[in-house]
Image (cartoon, grey):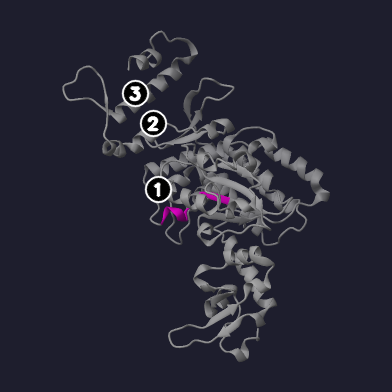
Amino acid sequence: QSAYQAKYCGQGISGTNTGFYKYEAKKLGFTYQSVGKKKKGDKTGNFTLKTATELESVKGKIIDILFRHTKSEMNLQRFSMTFNDTDKKQYLIYPKNMDNDEARVPEIFDRRASEEEIKDSIENLLQFINAYKKFVAEAETDGENLSRIFEIILYAFASAYIFKLRQETNNSKADIPIMLVIGGRAASGKSNLLAYIDRILSGRQLLIEQHYIQYKQVEKNLSDLFNTDNTYPLLVDEVAPKFFNSNAANKGEELIKYLSNTLDSKHPVMICTTNTGAFSIPAQVARRIYFLKVDTCFDERKKGEANAYYSSVMANANNLLFKDFCSRMGEKIIANETLFGDGLFDYLHVAREIFETYFEIAGMKKPSYFPSELYRDYESRGKTMWRTLFSQARDRFVYSPKKGDKEATLTVALKDLTNGVKDTQVYMNYLKQEILVEEAGLYVVLRANAFCDWINVKRVTAFSNFFKK
């Protein structure tokens, strides 16, 4: 204790570091009080360590006092913020790093924006999204691609509170994904989207590629990065598709399931990009990530104009709207407002609600492509793949009618219709699990009616009309 008092309690300390030392002293003092206890009648001021049971009961308090930084986190020098359970606010954290051997005192991040600031931010946001219509090779007429871009931004704004949503849900916390996967082909604007997200969340003005992390930088220590109190999202570009199917302990199904099931205190989420073509994941993983397909490519002939447009949007972007969002979220949490809607389970309901308020404040009409519910892109892609396979090879799906208690089935030698074991597994990954009866050696047995309903084709009722459309 004497060493602690001499270093942190102001003895002989002066100058610009005093505030930091007082902050460290208070943090360390609270930690001592939380993990230790005084013997009854002991007036020396010495503490003894609490029992394991006693420590378990104060675990949350200790975690709240100490903002966890892992070695991996510090090496990346990520933007750092954390949620304070006491006043329900986000705080900026200034950890020590190679260029700064002394951290600054945490600062409140939350800040209400003016009506003009909200309007300017929304206009900038819509300008960015409009690029995915203005400069792409084949612009969509239904605005679905624009809606997905907006949905990604909503998840990004909610990302610092995903841990809170997982704590408060009545569903399984694994149903609120800790990973958003943006799937798309080359030149579909995925990397620029990550950079823009960092710009409007952190407020930093950096070179484009400095706004996000390359997958190679975190490939071996993703688990380490999730186990910090930094609620700022991990923005990771070009995650290898094989990551999601890896059998390694620090990748794929094992890692995603473990993190989704066990993370119970403050933690970040990951927003990452990957190649759509080779992307497939096991069913147990699919429900634990949010997959959104951004697959409309930018027109190479408009590249110069698009780059100038993007630079202008980035230059005028700031994080005032995100600070306001954090302020409003804190108020909702303090007031014990529900963070979920009354209808279908939607973990982005609160983000939609706040953004609808922003459009009202700005006096702007909500765009027709504003996303009103969660997307099911992974399931939709699976339906399309299986519908195409079924349409091209109907005669290879052998129908067995209902017999007694056994329902009608379709049996297919999937390996004969695909290019080897790898492609077969991709199809199995995309198959809705309740449709599968069994994998019987070379054959896959499916529930006939459920399968036809799923891919939206006419039900098979007898062998005689099997080939009718």
Toward which corner of the image does residue 463 lie, by quadrant? Answer: bottom right
- Residue at position x 31%, y 39% in the image: 56
- Up-down: is 133 above or below 219? below
Q: Residue at x 61, y 64 (%)?
A: 425
Q: Which mark is residue 29?
A: 3
Which residue lies under the disc numbered 1? Answer: 167
Q: Which residue is mark 2?
A: 65
Give the image location of residue 189, x and y in percent: 70, 48
* Residue 210: image tag: none
Q: Is residue 373 visible?
A: no
Upstream in the sequence, badge 2 or badge 1? 2
Q: Is residue 124 magenta?
A: no
Q: Amino acid at mark 1?
A: Gln
Q: Nearer the viewer, residue 53 or 121?
A: 53
Per the model, the C-alpha gap separating discs 2 and 1 is: 19 Å
* Horizontal side, residue 312 vs residue 115: left or right: right
Q: Residues within 10 Å of mark 3 (few under 14, many from 20)?
A: some
Dot 1, crowdedness within 10 Å: few (<14), some or many (≥20)? some
Nearest the viewer among 255 and 439 is: 439
Kind of residue at disc 3? Gly
Stretch in magenta: 172-180
| Amino acid type assigned to the residue bearing label 2 in the image | Ile
Q: In this rendering, is residue 347 above or below 5?
A: below
| Viewport quadrant of the N terminus | top left
